[in-house]
Amino acid sequence: MAEIDKHFHKDDIPWIQGIPIDLYMEDTLFWPFTPNGQYIVKSGYRVGREMNLNPTRCSNMTDIQKWWKMIWSLHLPPRMKLFGWRVCHNWLPAKMNLKHRGMEVNTRCELCTRYDETLTHALWSCDKVKCIWKLLPWYKQASKLGEGSMFDILKSLEQIINKQDFEDTIKILWAIWENRNRK
């Protein structure tokens, strides 16, 4: 019992103690995300990435399917559609993502030098980037969307702007990212 107290939070201990134990069966490790139950790094990485997408926020998976169908049907070059997909999945090498993946990097945004460079900061909420967004007529409606992931921001934008403006938004995000990487 002392081992449980040593390793787990006190609120979790009753749950752990409530797990039935079969004294006649040997414990085995099983990874539910591969067909054979064996853990492989690729599946662990995939599960971790999927957890970061927060699909559970949507109570109806058809909404998520409609979202991706809309993204892939945009009248944009394939590289921009893929870029939009990567933005939504937080799969771009913003400095905080690089640090999260184990790289030793200075996480400060190089444009403003005030905040850590998350993907949301780099593409949406950095003061230097806001200057671009403020030029758009719909920005006043969207200026309060600076919280959350880029997926959250794009989902909200899609609700308040028309399809052409949304396509232009993806183009602008792409241009901001490309410009950031030229430096």
Image: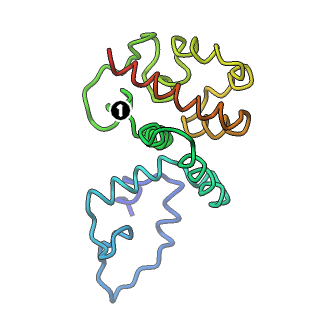
**Quarter assignment of residue 35:** bottom left
Q: How is the image coloured?
A: rainbow
47 w.r.t. 167: above or below: below
Q: Position of residue 17 (x, y in %)?
A: 47, 69
**Quarter assignment of residue 151:** top right
Decide which of 153, 57 is in the foreground and name it: 153
**Quarter assignment of residue 160:** top right
Residue that appears at 63% across and 34% down: 166
Circle 1 Cα neighbour tier, 10 Å, few/some/many (<14 / 14–19 / ≥20): few
Q: Position of residue 41 (x, y in %)?
A: 26, 57
The quarter in which the N terminus is drawn is bottom left
Residue that appears at 45% across and 53% down: 50
Q: Position of residue 14 (x, y in %)?
A: 53, 64
Farthest bottom residue? 24
158 w.r.t. 6: above or below: above
Q: Amino acid at mark 1?
A: Pro
All told, the count of numbered labels is 1
Residue carrying label 1: 93
Horizontal arrangement in the rendering, residue 145 relative to residue 44 (left or right): right
Secondary structure of residue under mark 1 = loop
Q: Position of residue 148 (x, y in %)?
A: 58, 34
125 w.r.t. 158: above or below: above
Horizontal arrangement in the rendering, residue 22 relative to residue 15 (left or right): left
